[in-house]
Amino acid sequence: MARPYPKQISPLEGEMPGRAEGGILARLALMIALALVSFPAHAASKAEVEAMFRAWIDNDLWPAARKTGVSEKTFRAAMDGVTLNWDLPDLVPPGSKPKKEQAQSQAEFSAPGAYFSEKRLQSLAARGSSLARAHASTLRRIEQRFGVPGEIVLAVWGRESGFGSAKIPYSAVEVLATKAFMSTRKDLFRKELIAALHIVDGGDRTVGQLRGSWAGALGQPQFMPTSFLQYAVDFDGDGVRDIWDSVPDTLASIANYLVKKGWQPGRGWGYEVSIPDGVSCAQEGPDLAKPISAWASSGITRISGKAFPAGEAKASGMMLVPAGTHGPEFIVTPNFYVLKEYNNSDLYALFLGNLADRIAYGSGPFRGAWGDVGRMLRSDVLAMQKALVAKGYDVGKVDGLPGYKTRRSLGDWQAKNGLAPTCFPDASLKAKLR
């Protein structure tokens, strides 16, 4: 049953009772503080910003939280002592402007091979295999209930928090409040802060126990508070959803998240393949799915030498070439894109898939070598995207990051201009693509 909204208490109640002039002065001070929050004329000092922050808590955050059903008791317990954390990244204090984005090259998107540290993968796989045996019974029950293989759940757990070994040092309320007040994405963090207050209100965690990362992600699965409310599971039967200290709750919550995002039981994430000459790399993407038998008919084979499972012939698969022809090639299932729901990166999902295969089958790195790509600045990729858009191509988001729409549009352009499609930006194309 929804909790009735508590009575809103004015921040001025109880101030200088019986003295009208005191009330007027207090109201005037509040109006000035609120004006500074909305329209700062200059970069404010830390003391001024802290005062604005307190006014924002009482006069902006509290009414918003109250409307969603957060109790005043919980709100005051969480917010009365909270202060701004000035050490967090991406902060924009009142009166200042966001820092301009500088030209850069990001390894996760521009140099794909750098993402797959063999030393790290081997370490996670060894630990994951040991934990698969230690928690075999729990993982079997999770797979029976949710349909997500244990190795996939373990891979997410390992990638997100080192199987629970990573430190989770921050007060989630402090982080979220700071970012909701003065970050580059205030609306997002305001929503997450109110969700965190609902977690406390629901009894799963006290304010002091609500620990997270510098970005406000909670516990071992690194759920944002809204995800906790939607997907966290009490799997050990103690009446609380504990993704900080309970392994069963942590693993079941990861599985619940994936199945709610569309995980298809009975299917894996995908296959490393060999794409023959004559089959264009510009066919990748979730919107260009084909039956796996159709991909096989075009000459695409598994790099392991094994045939695609007979039961997969009519099921859909998608081409994935994260480094174009300069790296490993894949046919992935819709479950691959479910993994991307956890973190919207092709390389992140491939990392999970490879780690899961190592845990389940003792396999090793991808067979295909990552080529010598990734030396272009993000600004260079951005210029290429703009040039493709001007020629009528759909590159997705024009952000300097070569996602699948950028890769396949580049491959299409190369083919139409007499070049062998590589489907990945490199310096040799900068002068040609204008």
Image: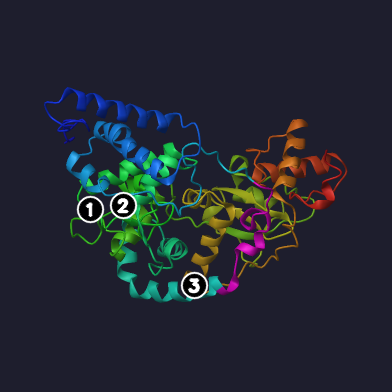
Q: Is residue 112 magenta?
A: yes
Sequence order check, earlier mark of 2 and 3: 3
Packing grade of label 1 (10 A; few <14, some 14-19, many >=20) is some
Q: Is 72 inside the magenta-drawn segment? A: no
Query: What secondary structure is found at the residue carrying circle 1?
Result: loop
Image spot of residue 216 (x, y percent): 39, 51
Q: Amino acid at mark 3?
A: Ala
User: Which labelled disc corresponds to residue 204?
Assistant: 1
Residue type at the position of mark 2: Ala
Q: How is the protein colored in the picture? A: rainbow
Q: Residue at x 31, y 65 (%)?
A: 247
Picture residue at 61% right of the left edge, 48% below the top? 318
Residue 252 coordinates in the image, percent (x, y): 32, 58
The magenta segment: 102-119
Q: Nearer the viewer, mark 2 or mark 1?
A: 1
Residue at the spot x=17%, y=43% of the render?
73
Q: Which residue is mark 2?
A: 232
Q: Which mark is residue 125?
A: 3
- Residue at the spot x=21%, y=43% of the render? 76
